[in-house]
Image (cartoon, grey):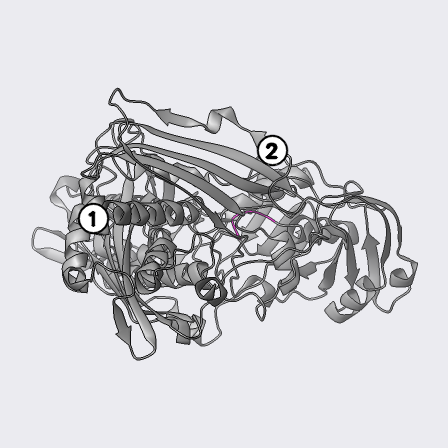
Amino acid sequence: MIGQPVDRVDGRIKVTGAAPYAADTKIPGVAYGYLVTSTIGRGRITAMDTSAALASPGVLAVYTPFNPLKLFAYVQEQNDERFHPLQDNEVRFFGQAIGFVVAETWEQARDAAGLVTATYEPQPPVTDFPGPTVRKAEEVEEVVGTRALGDITFTASYTTPFQHHCAMEPHATVATWNGDHLTVYTVSQGALLVQRRLSETLGVDAAKIHVLSPHVGGGFGGKWGNWAQVPLACAASRALNRPVKAALTREQVFTMAGHRPKTKQTISMTCTADGKLTSIVNDGVTSRGLGGNWSESVANWTLTTYASPNIRVTKTIVPLNLGAATVMRAPGEANGSFALESAMDELAEQLGLDPLELRLRNYATLVPNTGKPWSGKHLDECYRLGAEEFGWARRPKEVRATLDGDWLVGTGMATATYGSGRGQASIKVRLHPDGTASVSGTAADLGTGQYTVFAILAADELGIPVARVRPELGDSTSPAAANAGGSTSTGTNGPAVQVAAKAVQTELINLAVTNPRSPFHGKDPASVVYKDGSVSSGGLTTSFGTLLTTCDVGGVEAVGTSPKLVDPEHGFRSFGAHFCEVKVHRLTGEPRVTRWLSVCDAGTIVNAKAARSQIQGAVVMGIGQALLEATEVDASARFTNANLASYLVPVHADVPRIDVRFLNHPDPVISGLGARGIGELGIVGVAGAIANAVHHATGVRVRDLPITLDKLLG
């Protein structure tokens, strides 16, 4: 079953609207919360007038820094807000939560929130580079060899703008208490992330907090952490002794639920006359929103991509008066690859080499910054297969060499790599008398297909059809599985599913030989065999459902744990190569991606259909990064296009047919399953490939994303 194209087991309930999302939760007597947000980007709140709001119909309470809900400080860093909301009167960014109105209906809460007024002592916000900087010396990494530097040099700077996740589902939370026990229905990339954060800030034992997040309408990193509506809804519910529901508006999602930081990279390279790199230096600058702590290690992609005896990267952090920057699909790698892949093409042009040939001449057979062997790497096969399938050999060397009517045609390529790993995970598998099995863990499915991965791996190990397996995700009372992030869900949870499915077979055999009602009672366990959903011994075979029914037992279950991979001897990454064709209108400068091929080396592919969809979706997101997406900030520190009308993401007309190929070479070093991550691999290098193709079409090199028509007409 592993590696076959399997339909999503949750597909039907999603397309029919039956899948329960957090905002769909209906609890009798629920009240509604609405956040009041700041209208300055930096300063102090000196007073707030809530009298009109309190007198408004249906209003139950208005909480502000002058009348706060009690929340304790956050302890652990989770790539989200570092300040618990409403606990002080400092304004760190435009759109910061400064109040929370609770009313009988959402409309009443919204209208009353509009009646709250705040008086400020404003200060000029810092919104752009340059600004006050903090150099973190521990984030400067260097590899110095003994070879002399080459005579050929190249230096250029590349920038990327603020970007937003734009998941379809806004963030929402519904909280209800039963005595001192809290149940939370919320949006999260991991139920345990919510449970841990709420335990800190509410001062409640984590065992008394039940988090449910069975379906998530997209995340891309923006739902890894917890944002202001989560603790406020929970604390207000406790204070008012009734359920409270709070959902962010789309603009509030933009302002307070994280963004990809702005970056600048200055890359300097030297090489020999035949194109062998002798040094790479990448000085990275990244923003950090003062609403949080996280910042992007944007230059680090340079450490692990191409072979060079001298590699150095630095990181400079610029604090800005914005909400928390946070992880966004391929954090560091999506932006980092745009710069390095563009620079490699520019160097190839300077040398008169084919861009693919330059990459092959600097192929890293060992991890460049450590010298360790890879757990598995077939990137050269990705290059060669992709070049053959795409027709790279027919590519003209000269720029502006191909015209299709009024369209200039160019092709480009780029390398994709993304880190892989295997954390610890525990999964429970239970066999039921009706012949079905359930497989459960705290993992999340953001639309990425984790439900189906659970079903495939359990079905494969149990020898039953996928349709007879019921996966259960997003419940904090389940065994602790991996959160959905870092492209590690399948690589971490998959082996644990296999361990649990094997363990439950042992439990079933123990039942078979010990239960007096069992036809196998008294037999030596070694003589009883489980295979394809049935137990056999001495010529007698019975399905596990029949056995459980005969024994009058409601089920058998087992929890399996796969330990964290600790292997300091290898480097673990997934790899790929992108090839694309871009057309640019010679009169209007309009760029269009017209053809795409991605070839990926990501170990074992569990579900061919979902894996292909993951890469296609990542490429679409990369097309947005390359050509469309940029969040604009004005002088007041306000995101001016904080909506889905003004913030441009790709639509059907922007996306060509995306061809995806997998090498499907298992990686036995990472696990017995041999699967590495793919969810973020697909976006890495996409913007670089498009920039390279645009240059090949037009002769114009754009180093500042996005590549808009005005930059091609200048």
Q: Tell me the quarter of the image containing the N terminus.
A: bottom left
**Please, which residue is most extreme toward the left here?**
539
Is 91 positioned to the left or the right of 600 in the image? right
Q: Quadrant of residue 597?
A: bottom left
Q: Quadrant of residue 623?
A: bottom left
Residue 616 lies in the magenta-colored region: no
Q: Nearer the viewer, mark 1 or mark 2?
A: 1
Tags 1 and 2 touching, CB below 8 Å: no
* Magenta stretch, overall SS: loop
Q: Which residues are magenta?
A: 222-226
Is 470 positioned to the left or the right of 68 in the image? left
Q: Secondary structure at mark 1?
A: loop
Please tell me which of labels 1 and 2 falls first in the chain.
2
Eyeballing the image, is 57 above or below 300?
Answer: below
The residue at which mark 2 appears reads as: 133
Q: Position of residue 692 (x, y in %)?
A: 33, 56
Callout 2 amino acid: Thr
Q: Position of residue 254 (x, y in %)?
A: 61, 58
Eyeballing the image, is 360 above or below 468?
Answer: above
Q: Position of residue 626 (x, y in %)?
A: 42, 59
Q: Residue at x 53, y 59 (%)?
A: 630
Residue toward you, 259 or 442: 259
The answer to whether residue 470 is seen in the rendering is: no
Tell me if mark 1 has few (under 14), some (14-19) or many (20+) residues whose alpha carbon lies within 10 angstroms of its own: some
Q: CA distance from mark 1 to mark 2?
A: 39 Å
Q: Residue at x 7, y 55 (%)?
A: 539
Callout 1 amino acid: Leu
Is 71 positioned to the left or the right of 198 in the image? right
The residue at which mark 1 appears reads as: 353
**Please, which residue is most extreme toward the bottom here?**
405
